[in-house]
Amino acid sequence: MSLALDRYAHLDSPLHRWEPRCKLIGLLALIFAFAFVESWFLIPVILGISAGLMSLSRLPLRFFLRRLRYPGLFLLVVVMALPWLSGTTVLWQWGTLTLRQEGLVATGLIASRFVSILCLGLVLFGTTPFLTLIRTLRSLRLSPVLTDIALLTYRYLFDVSTMLAQMQQAMRLRGFQLRCPKGGLRPSRRFPSRQDCQQLAALMGTLLIRSYEQSERTYQAMRLRGHGQLQPALIGITLTPSTQPQQRWSILGGVIAVLIAVSILVIEGLT
């Protein structure tokens, strides 16, 4: 999976043309509002808003599916036990397995909020170049330390990914291959053997140590160049607010997004 979230930031769509500050404020307001939704009848509303923004962004569907895959598996592992353990109203029972209504509703709420929030985040990052987003955060008076950390983290994710690919290639060239528990070559996706797990753990440990050493070298290089003492710019990049003129529809879109978020919170508070 590609780590570049702004791979399609060059496309032309209403959300791509949305002024970054208005877009950031509007989408963050919706994200926070979605996080507080607990009423079942609001789930179609937040899913519809997310789907509408995804359609307006004109981002490829595979962009969302590839990035929802691994978080979706994590969510599945976390909430799959709720319908069987939470609640008192029994919908179906077979032996010791009991499907409960309250747990099923909770699972639907958690999954819907999770998907909606993640899709809005992907829309935000997918329609805005990352450096533009950093400049926008700076223009909104976010701490320079936090923006520098975000920029460095995103920058060195690619280095860590390249390092991992090189280490995996080196292991394959030395004959490493996942094997079945009985020792045969793996013909399909199965659980790795204990020896394979040990080698993979050593690989991740080495990667962690190399990443830590890289962070120490980067920190020392930045200190030697006076970062944080003379100028707020990071590595020669001037993080100033965007000079793009604010169009009326951008401001209007931000206001509408905030009003929708407030309306959702009000409705949630009244129910």
Image: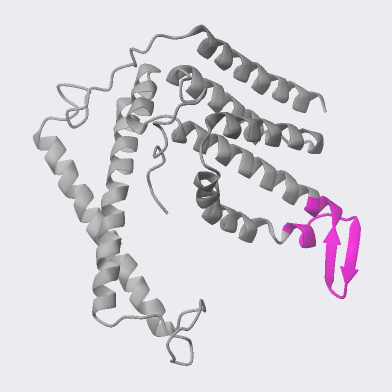
- Position of the C terminus, as image quadrant, is top right
Left or right of 172 in this view: 57: right
Q: Is residue 258 above or below residue 44?
A: above
Left or right of 213 in this view: 151: right
Span highlighted in magenta in the image:
82-104
Looking at the rendering, which quadrant does residue 228 occupy?
top left
Q: Nearer the viewer, residue 217 or 49?
A: 49
Tell how many labels. 0
State the residue at coordinates (24%, 77%). 173
Q: Nearer the viewer, residue 66 or 144?
A: 66
The x, y position of residue 265, in whole percent, is 70, 24
Q: Is residue 52 above or below residue 136?
A: below
State the residue at coordinates (23%, 72%). 170
The x, y position of residue 252, in whole percent, is 57, 11
State the residue at coordinates (50%, 49%). 67
Residue 126 visible (yes or no): yes
Q: Residue lying farthest left?
A: 224
- The answer to if 265 sits in the magenta stretch is no
Display coloring: one colour
Residue 38 visible (yes or no): no
Looking at the rendering, which quadrant does residue 10 occupy?
top left
- Position of the N terminus, as image quadrant, is bottom left
Q: Is residue 17 above or below residue 108?
A: above
Q: Is residue 16 above or below residue 170?
A: above
Left or right of 206 in this view: 49: right
The x, y position of residue 168, in whole percent, is 30, 69
The x, y position of residue 114, in whole percent, is 62, 44
State the residue at coordinates (65%, 16%). 259
